[in-house]
Image: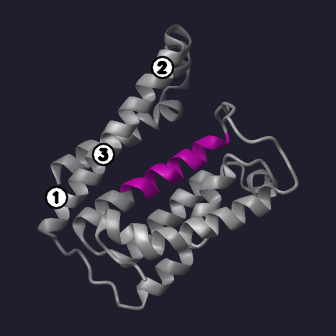
Amino acid sequence: MAYLVLGLVLFLGVHSVSIVAPAWRDRVAARLGKAWRGLYSLVSIASFVVIIWGYGIARQSPVVVYTPPTWTRYVTAVLMLPVFPLLLAAYFPGRIKGSLQHPMLVGVMLWSLAHLIATGTLAGVVLFGGFLAWAVADRISYRWRTQRPIQAAPPMRLNDAIVVVAGLALYVVFAHWLHARWIGVQPL
């Protein structure tokens, strides 16, 4: 569990710098230039690997907090449907991105909530609850902090269609093949 918590603290910590210390982040990013992006990416990737590794270790000796009913798998599957399209919508400007402002955060919230519903272990509560709490805090702070532009595709009418079709295709591929291979659990 220690590795899972360490990975979460590092990953969510680096992703929270803009929330808790935007002026410091801007000063350091300006001083380091492209090195800031490299360092940010390196810490993000390394901490994400530690999260996955720590979660895998914690799953070997699960501590059951609650036992979700079997039908929650279906609720999770339905809640997960918009997640991949929402993640993609952050990079394809269209009506989805315009109406949600930060669709990736909404996707993370749905992903976290869906997995909290279906996973009753302590490691699951720590992992998905941590991401849910972070996404809610980030979403709240989104209203009052200055937004940085995200590199995205050019705005087009077809972006929403691309997001929905590609996102649902990713959902099918991940749910039917990749989740079992990468996570070790067959969701459907």
Comparing 186 with 99, the one in front is 186
Task: Give the percent coordinates (x, y) of residue 21.
Answer: 49, 26
The quadrant the N terminus occupies is: bottom left
Amino acid marked by disc 1 = Ile
Decide whether the magenta segment is chiefly helix, strand or loop: helix
**What residue would you read off at disc 2?**
36
**What residue would you read off at disc 3?**
49
The quadrant the C terminus occupies is: bottom left
Residue at (35% x, 78% y) in the render:
186
Amino acid marked by disc 3 = Val
**What residue would you read off at disc 1?**
57
* Dot 2 or dot 3, earlier in sequence: 2
Task: Give the percent coordinates (x, y) of residue 84.
Answer: 58, 62
Q: Would you say residue 134 sits in the magenta stretch?
A: yes
> Disc 2 and disc 3: Cα gap in Å?
20 Å
> Is residue 97 visible to the viewer in this orientation of the structure?
yes
* Dot 3 or dot 1, earlier in sequence: 3
Over which residues does the magenta segment extend? 130-143
Amino acid marked by disc 2 = Trp
Residue at (42% x, 85% y) in the render:
72
Comparing 114 with 188, the one in front is 188
* Looking at the image, residue 183 lies above or below residue 159: below
> Disc 3 and disc 1: Cα gap in Å?
12 Å
What residue occupies the far right of the structure in this picture? 157
Secondary structure beneath label 3: helix
